[in-house]
Amino acid sequence: MPGISETPRTSRQVSDMPSPRRLLSTNKVYEGRIWDVVSDSFQLSEGTDTLVRDYIDHPGAVAVLPMNVDGEILLLKQYRHPVGMDLWEIPAGLLDVEGEDFVVGAARELAEEADLVAATWNVLVDFFNSPGSSSEAVRIYLARGLRDVPEAERHVRTDEEAEIELHWVPLEEAVKAVLEGRLHNPSAVLGILAAAAAKADGFTSLRPANAPWPAHPSQR
């Protein structure tokens, strides 16, 4: 409106960062098959009340958005029991192999779940899956330069993975599916939207596959 001046805004780069607090105690309250539940007592600062938080202690995970030369991405359908739904996802798995490099784990999941090997790898996005209740950190890679794993070397999928269906989708159609609320898996949603954003400059702004991942618990 005329006559109303706005206070100049200063530009500031936003970035999450570690914030150590005083840990008073930590106890494992449940030991699960894949992850545990722990209970921490801590203080936000000296002299403040003690807080107690229970959360899932998670090894972290990697996910892969495979993209072919036509710009299509590979989605896989898998049953997820906690939500009782078949979800369209991208290849993903736990970082549960001691000392395994992150991108090596991603390549393993790509081969096991999609029967593919990639020549070109970049980091698409890093995120915490549910930071209020879990320590799970997830890294999503963009995988290109794809080729099939030879038939004789393919992983035998069992349990829920035995029902996996694979489907190539144009990236633009996948973005539409996200925005229309038809896709719900967080790694798929974030990977698809990040790839669409990165496509604007031909993916040149993406980080290399070996980019530091300081948010992962093993790196802190």
Image (spheres, rainbow, N blue to C red):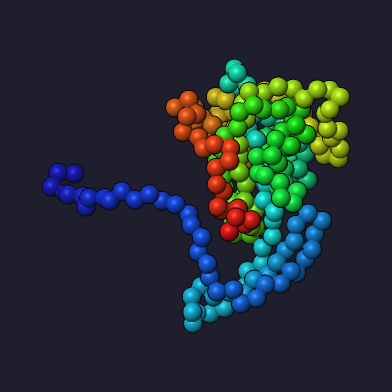
At 74% across and 51% down in the image, what residue appears? 98
- Give the residue furthest to the bottom: 47
Look at the picture and state if 212 lies above or below 204.
Answer: below
Question: Residue at (65%, 53%) from the top-left corner?
Answer: 136
Residue positioned 71% across, 46% down in the render: 100
Q: Is residue 51 visible?
A: no
Which quarter of the rendered picture does the N terminus lie within?
Answer: top left
Q: Residue 93, position in %: x, y?
A: 72, 43
In screen coordinates, is 185 left or right of 84? left
In the rendered view, tell whether residue 63 sits above or below residue 117. below
Residue 45 picture location, percent across and down = 48, 75
Q: Residue 35, percent across and down?
A: 75, 57
Looking at the image, residue 106 lies above or below residue 10: above
**Residue drawn at x 61%, y 28% as measured from the top left:** 120
Residue 71 falls left or right of residue 88:
left
Indicate the quadrant where residue 145 lies: top right
**Which residue is the extreme one toward the top?**
70
Residue 162 falls in which quadrant of the image?
top right
Q: Is residue 212 visible?
A: yes
Q: Nearer the viewer, residue 185 or 137?
A: 137
Quarter of the rendering occupied by the C terminus: bottom right
Judging depth in this view, the residue of 70 and 190 nearest the camera is: 70
Task: Find the residue positioned furthest to the left.
Answer: 3
Q: Quick check: 185 above or below 120?
A: below
Left or right of 159? Residue 99 is left
Q: How many marks?
A: 0
Q: Position of residue 20 (x, y in %)?
A: 52, 67
